[in-house]
Image (cartoon, rainbow, N blue to C red):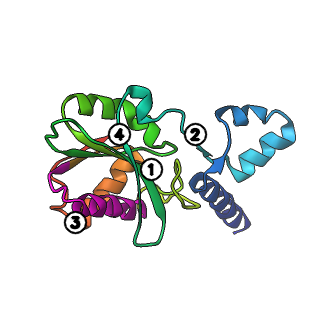
C-alpha cells in the first residue's frame, strides 16, 4: 500500500509540473548537473518552458492586427489576424503543446500567398495569453470557442482550422460539441 501511495504522489507531482509552464529559456534544463538537482527533477518532474515570441508577422512582410478575446472561463487570449488581399476564406491556426502563435507563421505566410486570411491563436498559458496551466486540450476547447466567436462576431463565416498536436486535440474537443461551426479541419499529429 505504501508503494502505491508513493507512486501516486510521484505521478501527481509529474502531472502538475507537466501542465504548468514556467517562464524561462530553452537551455535552462542544461543547468541540472548536480546529483541533487537530477534527483529533484526525477522525483518532481520538469515543467515545460513557456516559449518566447521570436518573430511577428511583420518579419515576413505581412500586415496584421493584434486581437484579444476572453474565454467563457475568463481567460484572456491573444492572437494575430493576418488579412489576405483577396480573401478566399479564413483559417484558424492552433499551435501544439509548449508552442505559441509565432510557431505558426510559416503556415500563415503560405496561406496568405494563397489568399487566405489567418487567425493565429495563443492558447491559454502559452505565448502572451493568460492562464496558469494547460489541460492538454480539454479546457483549450474554450479557447477555440472564443476564437470561433471572434470570427463570427466579425462576420467571418467561411473558415476552417489547422491544429497541431494539442491544438488538434482542442479542435476535436470543441467539434465534439459544435459539429457544424468549422467548415473543414486539418489535424497534424
Question: Residue 189 — which label?
Answer: 4
In x, y percent, where is residue 155? Answer: 19, 59
Residue 105 falls in which quadrant of the image? Answer: top left
x, y percent for residue 163: 32, 45
Label 4: few (<14), some (14–19) or many (≥20) C-alpha neighbours in 10 Å: few
Q: Earlier in the sequence, mark 4 or mark 1?
A: 1
Name the residue carrying label 3: 178
Query: What is the span of residues highlighted in magenta in the rendered image?
Result: 139-159
Which one is closest to the eye, mark 3 or mark 2? Answer: 2
Counting other residues with Cα less than 10 Å from the Cα at mark 2, is it few (<14), some (14-19), or many (20 or more)?
A: some
Decide: is 66 above or below 178: above
Give the position of the C terminus as an image quadrant: top left
Q: CA distance from mark 1 to mark 3?
A: 21 Å
Q: Residues within 10 Å of mark 1 (few under 14, many from 20)?
A: many
Q: Earlier in the sequence, mark 1 or mark 3?
A: 1
Upstream in sequence: badge 4 or badge 2 = 2
Secondary structure, mark 4, is loop
Looking at the rendered structure, the secondary structure element under dot 1 is: loop
- CB under 8 Å between callouts 3 and 2? no
Residue 162 coordinates in the image, percent (x, y)? 28, 43
Residue in the image at 33% along x and 58% along y:
147
Amino acid at each position: 500500500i505504501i508503494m502505491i501511495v508513493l507512486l501516486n504522489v510521484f505521478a501527481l507531482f509529474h502531472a502538475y509540473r507537466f501542465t504548468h509552464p514556467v517562464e524561462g529559456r530553452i537551455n535552462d534544463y542544461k543547468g541540472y548537473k548536480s546529483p541533487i538537482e537530477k534527483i529533484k527533477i526525477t522525483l518532481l518532474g520538469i515543467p515545460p518552458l513557456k516559449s518566447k515570441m521570436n518573430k511577428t508577422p511583420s518579419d515576413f512582410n505581412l500586415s496584421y492586427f493584434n486581437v484579444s478575446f476572453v474565454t467563457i472561463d475568463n481567460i484572456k487570449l491573444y492572437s494575430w489576424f493576418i488579412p489576405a488581399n483577396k480573401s478566399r476564406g479564413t483559417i484558424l491556426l492552433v499551435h501544439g503543446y509548449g508552442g505559441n502563435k509565432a510557431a505558426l507563421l510559416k503556415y500563415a505566410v503560405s496561406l496568405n500567398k494563397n489568399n487566405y486570411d489567418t487567425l493565429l491563436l495563443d492558447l491559454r498559458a502559452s505565448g502572451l495569453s493568460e492562464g496558469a496551466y494547460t489541460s492538454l486540450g480539454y479546457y483549450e476547447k474554450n479557447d477555440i470557442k472564443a476564437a470561433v466567436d471572434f470570427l463570427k462576431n466579425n462576420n467571418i463565416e467561411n473558415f476552417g482550422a489547422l491544429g497541431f498536436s494539442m491544438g488538434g486535440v482542442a479542435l476535436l474537443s470543441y467539434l465534439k460539441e459544435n459539429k457544424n461551426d468549422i467548415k473543414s479541419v486539418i489535424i497534424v499529429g
